């Protein structure tokens, strides 16, 4: 049964290049179409970013495309009642009637207040067009909701602070020692999943040591040189203790780097602020050579003092690094051991391994340029962010890279998009590094310098988060608490596509209540899910394999498409492989039609030119009207040159440009913007937030706006009665991501084969202590009376204080009847209340503690398998 | 004449199932039929536990016990080493399924749709009507691909860590031969006397 066997003659046998859409990495693929049916997905060997490799999800895409329960006609809700499990009473209507209805609602909303429109999507390739629509409409409310609760909150602001880019990644080609915290980076997860999985395999083969810090023996930990189990939510303590060893015990830190590229030499007064030159307000440093204070930019950086106590006009002044160094002493390995459960000798050993591998002082010659060589890096992601003190967690880990001088130099932690063909990091106020990427603000805000705190205008209340990049987790709380936060309008219309907010944000009840506050919800979707259940209007969206979408892989803007050192800047396209199912339409083409109906098309074009950074002669003329194909063609040519327009992409699917130069890959020595190791600007930002929230009588915790990072416990660490003694940790699966993958019968069959996906993992010794056997049905209960049931699966690969729940499962609306309810819905266990949010990064704390009890013993002797 | 074989590097497999799905889509197998499953095993004890991932497929043995066991001679071995089941000759005895020490063969009782009774367009294109039911199937080393001259098996092509390498075991200079020599490639259950054409590296 190997070869394609058909009864009919083959009249068509062709391969169409396009971009995969089963996660967010936009791998370049080609799809085999025979007689009008898509039969196989493969990579294209020469095409970045995946160079011919396709993961399980990408291979399985066809079973989402051909889901028989695709939404094929516009539908309108007839049941006024909305809620989880409430049948919307869908009634078919024509596209024209649907768009008339939506146009009517949008017109009314705009007349009330243009800001009352909110658009939520994780279809990132649609962002530019959608933001142009919102700009023309007059609304600042573009959000992704789910992504941005637990994930990049503790990464993006830190990455901006360290590199001027919205993300960072380790230099896998040259790194010799990689320390990973709370991430499966390089194991079919995260950024450039396919490209980096190849790079990680090569790096490990080359001899790179991989040390994975994770409560779970994850896929990454399984292949690591060493797995370090850790109590959830304590990684900051580990990072700070590692730095204590490096700085105070071993002297393994890059003093030269700190002097030249950070604010370590800036003098700090008793109030914690910089001491500034009275004339020009520039921060002062101590010139060791001349034994006097000087502005930071008036001396040779190597002459700046890192330590010491100096008297300046009767005030005691210390260099920032001096304070940092002293601060670290309160995080000894012994102290960190009690917090993390990691033995102090392990902490010391890893610190020294990391510090020695960093090879401080070493250089490397690349393309005739001598650069610092620091082949040790510490990377981190979701596991660090998803906590009450996500910002502090991320910053602490990030600082391991700063003190060893590996930022943006060969071997170390590198910027994703800070330096590109026509931009680079810049020097901003106080000499601090600021982003120069012109696309930066399109979906994130920059945190350095901190933004002005003002009365909230966005539903996310991002104006109250001056050092975050977004505040998506606040959206439901902002909607529900609009009165309290003094929001000058209420949401009227939600346009939603490709983000399953009900299942993938915080607790579903809260999200549901927020959605019910919005009078009109228009969902574009190709399948029903937990969120479309709340829609008033449901419009059939094309599947990714049915639509034209330009510039999907976009390394200028999407940090996860970061071009690796020495690799070419590349772009790809999505194009229709098969005809749209039923009456499905590409939702962005519909958005453009809505703009026209609303009389906003001209303004949309004007906005789009800026947002997409189109250059002449490809900018859209606001007096004309373009087809979607024409817009795609112009955009492609603007980025890729006159000869590489739509025609090129339809034929080849991708375009590779110049290689990422040494200066773009490793920009650190080419610019002067300094990294704030000491977060002095946090103090002022916090004071502004405090002033505003106090004046508005909004209770708001600003205690994390401090210049030196701490480990602080999550609410779960201390709150519960003692019987709530186990943390529930959500773990990643390489073959299931995003909720729609659990619609896919192939992937769900694999989940059944895997045996670990629908059960809950428990440490073998913990299970023995609690009298739980393999295969027992157990019930988890949180202090907030949230419950879940699952089969217990005993494992040695889990911290004894944890239970492991994988993926996004336990779904309650899915086309795949067999799968409904299977597995545990992790998010339903989370408390989604304001006190669980990090007021700096807007992360939602995902630390959950439960007590467990046996519901039903396994019947077989010796245990059964799920 | 090449003798086709494969090397699988366990130290590189990350348990992602890309190969497993690529194989299914390439070969159009029905629900429940997987030629290339990846198994997982936990080793060690906390805190030095880890998971090992074991990609599997038919090993196209030099001495295939399935071929010996088949009462209707439906299983044959090509000159290039590929072992194939002829569905037209297979009578569904399942003697081969019992004989194989590796569980590489699957008997197809029925072909249902992944979503229920109605087949999706993909399934309509890929499940040959009335073919396959009541017979045994297994991995073919993607013979239809390698016979084209320049294609690798689908599992090899898609693997993101390049843990599967395919090539000519008769050629001492081929990558597979070198890897087996230099890294002490071992066969699964060598005591079974099957002499598999697939070698594992640790």
Image (cartoon, coloured by chain):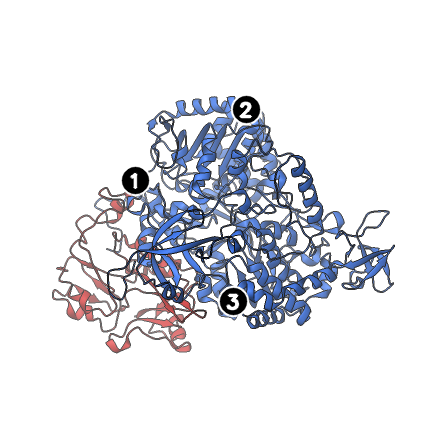
Chain colours: A blue, B red
The foreground one among B100 and A43 is: B100
Residue A88 x/y as whole percent:
35, 31
* A292 left or right of B156 in image: right
Query: In x, y percent, where is residue B130?
Result: 17, 49
Disc 1 marks which residue?
A68
**Location of mark 3 (residue):** A210
1 and 2 marks in contact (CB < 8 Å): no
Q: Nearer the viewer, mark 1 or mark 2?
A: 2
Return the chain for callout 2: A
Quadrant location, the N terminus of chain A: bottom left
Label 2 sits on a secondary structure element that is: helix
Dot 1: chain letter: A
Q: Is residue A87 above or below residue A360?
A: above
Which element carries disc 3, helix, strand or loop?
A: strand
Q: Earlier in the sequence, mark 3 or mark 1?
A: 1
What label does residue A501 carry, if any? none
């Amino acid at each position: 049964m190997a070869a394609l066997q058909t009864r009919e003659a083959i009249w068509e046998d062709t391969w169409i290049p396009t971009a995969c859409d089963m996660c967010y990495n936009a791998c370049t693929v080609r799809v085999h179409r025979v007689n009008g049916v898509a039969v196989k997905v493969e990579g294209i060997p020469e095409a970045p970013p995946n160079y011919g490799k396709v993961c399980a999800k990408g291979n399985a895409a066809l079973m989402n495309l051909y889901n028989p329960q695709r939404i094929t006609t516009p539908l309108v809700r007839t049941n006024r009642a909305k809620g989880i499990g409430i049948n919307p009473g869908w009634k078919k209507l024509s596209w024209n009637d649907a768009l008339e209805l939506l146009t009517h609602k949008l017109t009314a909303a705009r007349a009330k207040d243009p800001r009352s429109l909110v658009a939520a999507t994780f279809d990132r390739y649609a962002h530019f067009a959608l933001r142009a629509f919102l700009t023309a409409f007059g609304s600042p409310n573009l959000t992704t909701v789910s992504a941005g609760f637990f994930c990049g909150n503790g990464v993006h602001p830190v990455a901006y602070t360290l590199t001027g880019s919205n993300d960072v990644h380790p230099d896998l080609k040259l790194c010799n020692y990689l320390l990973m915290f709370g991430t499966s980076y390089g194991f079919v997860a995260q950024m450039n999943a396919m490209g980096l999985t190849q790079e990680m395999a090569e790096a490990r083969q080359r001899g790179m040591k991989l040390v994975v810090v994770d409560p779970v023996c994850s896929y990454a930990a399984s292949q690591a040189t060493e797995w370090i189990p850790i109590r959830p939510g304590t990684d900051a303590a580990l990072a700070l203790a590692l730095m204590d060893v490096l700085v105070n015990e071993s002297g393994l830190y890059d003093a030269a780097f700190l002097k030249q590229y950070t604010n370590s030499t800036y003098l700090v007064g008793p109030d914690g602020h910089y001491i500034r030159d009275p004339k020009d307000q520039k921060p002062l440093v101590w010139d060791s050579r001349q034994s006097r204070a000087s502005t930071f930019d008036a001396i040779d950086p190597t002459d700046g003092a890192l330590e010491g106590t100096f008297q300046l006009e009767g005030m005691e002044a210390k260099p920032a690094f001096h304070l940092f160094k002293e601060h670290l002493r309160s995080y000894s390995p012994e102290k960190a051991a009690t917090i993390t459960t990691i033995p102090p000798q392990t902490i010391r050993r890893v610190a020294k391994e990391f510090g020695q591998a960093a090879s401080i002082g070493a250089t490397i010659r690349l393309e005739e340029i001598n650069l610092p060589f620091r082949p040790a890096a510490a990377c981190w992601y979701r596991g660090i962010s998803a906590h009450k003190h996500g910002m502090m967690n991320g910053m602490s880990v990030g600082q391991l890279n700063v003190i060893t001088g590996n930022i943006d130099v060969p071997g170390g932690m590198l910027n994703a998009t800070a330096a590109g063909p026509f931009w680079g990091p810049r020097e901003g106020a106080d000499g601090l590094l600021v982003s120069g990427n012109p696309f930066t603000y399109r979906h994130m805000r920059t945190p350095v310098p901190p933004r002005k705190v003002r009365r909230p205008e966005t539903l996310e209340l991002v104006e109250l988060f001056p050092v975050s990049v977004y505040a998506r987790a606040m959206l439901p709380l902002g909607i529900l608490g609009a009165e309290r936060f003094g929001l000058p309008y209420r949401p009227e219309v939600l346009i939603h596509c490709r983000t399953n907010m009900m299942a993938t944000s915080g607790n579903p009840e809260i999200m549901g209540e927020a959605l019910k506050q919005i009078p009109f919800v228009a969902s574009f979707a190709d399948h029903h899910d937990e969120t479309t259940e709340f829609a008033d209007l449901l419009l059939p969206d094309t599947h990714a394999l049915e639509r034209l979408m330009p510039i999907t892989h976009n390394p200028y803007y999407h940090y996860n498409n970061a071009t690796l050192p020495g690799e070419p800047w590349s772009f790809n396209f999505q194009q229709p492989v098969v005809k749209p199912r039923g009456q499905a339409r590409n939702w962005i083409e519909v958005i453009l039609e809505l703009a026209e109906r609303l009389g906003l098309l001209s303004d949309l074009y004007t906005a789009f030119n800026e947002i997409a950074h189109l250059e002449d002669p490809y900018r859209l003329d606001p007096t004309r009207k373009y087809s979607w194909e024409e817009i795609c063609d112009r955009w492609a040519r603007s980025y890729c040159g006159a000869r590489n327009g739509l025609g090129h992409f339809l034929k080849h699917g991708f375009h590779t440009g110049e290689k990422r130069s040494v200066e773009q890959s490793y920009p650190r020595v080419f610019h002067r913007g300094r990294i704030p190791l000491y977060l002095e600007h946090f103090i002022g930002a916090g004071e502004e937030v405090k002033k505003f929230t106090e004046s508005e009588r909004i209770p708001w915790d600003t205690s994390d706006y401090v210049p030196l990072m701490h480990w602080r416990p999550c609410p779960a660490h201390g709150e519960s009665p003692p019987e709530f003694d186990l943390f529930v940790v959500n773990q990643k699966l390489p073959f299931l991501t995003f909720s729609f993958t659990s619609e896919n019968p192939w992937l769900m069959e694999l989940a059944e084969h895997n045996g670990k996906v629908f059960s809950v993992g428990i440490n073998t010794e913990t299970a023995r202590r609690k009298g739980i056997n393999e295969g027992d049905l157990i019930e988890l209960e949180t202090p907030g009376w949230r419950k879940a049931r699952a089969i217990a699966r005993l494992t040695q690969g889990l911290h004894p204080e944890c239970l492991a729940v994988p993926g996004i499962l336990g779904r309650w609306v899915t086309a795949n009847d067999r799968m409904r309810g299977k597995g545990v819905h992790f998010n339903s266990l989370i408390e989604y209340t304001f006190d669980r949010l990090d007021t700096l990064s807007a992360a939602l704390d995902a630390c959950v503690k439960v007590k467990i009890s046996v519901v039903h013993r396994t019947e077989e002797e010796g245990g059964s398998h799920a | 004449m090449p003798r086709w074989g494969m090397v699988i590097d366990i130290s590189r497999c990350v348990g992602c199932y890309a190969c497993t799905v690529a194989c299914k889509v390439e070969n159009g197998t029905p629900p429940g039929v997987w030629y290339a499953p990846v198994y997982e095993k936990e080793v060690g004890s906390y805190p030095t536990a880890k998971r090992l991932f074991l990609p599997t497929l038919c090993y196209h043995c030099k001495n295939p016990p399935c071929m010996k066991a088949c009462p209707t001679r439906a299983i044959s071995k090509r000159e290039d080493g590929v072992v194939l089941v002829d569905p037209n000759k297979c009578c569904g005895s399942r003697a081969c399924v019992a004989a194989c020490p590796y569980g590489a063969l699957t008997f197809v009782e029925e072909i249902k749709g992944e979503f229920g009774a109605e087949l999706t367009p993909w399934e309509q294109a890929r499940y040959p009507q009335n073919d396959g039911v009541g017979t045994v199937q297994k991995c073919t080393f993607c013979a239809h691909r390698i016979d084209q001259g320049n294609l690798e098996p689908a599992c090899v092509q898609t693997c993101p860590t390049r843990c599967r390498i395919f090539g000519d075991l008769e050629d001492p200079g081929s990558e597979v031969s070198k890897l087996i020599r230099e890294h002490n490639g071992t066969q699964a259950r060598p005591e079974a006397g099957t002499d598999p054409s697939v070698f594992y590296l640790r």
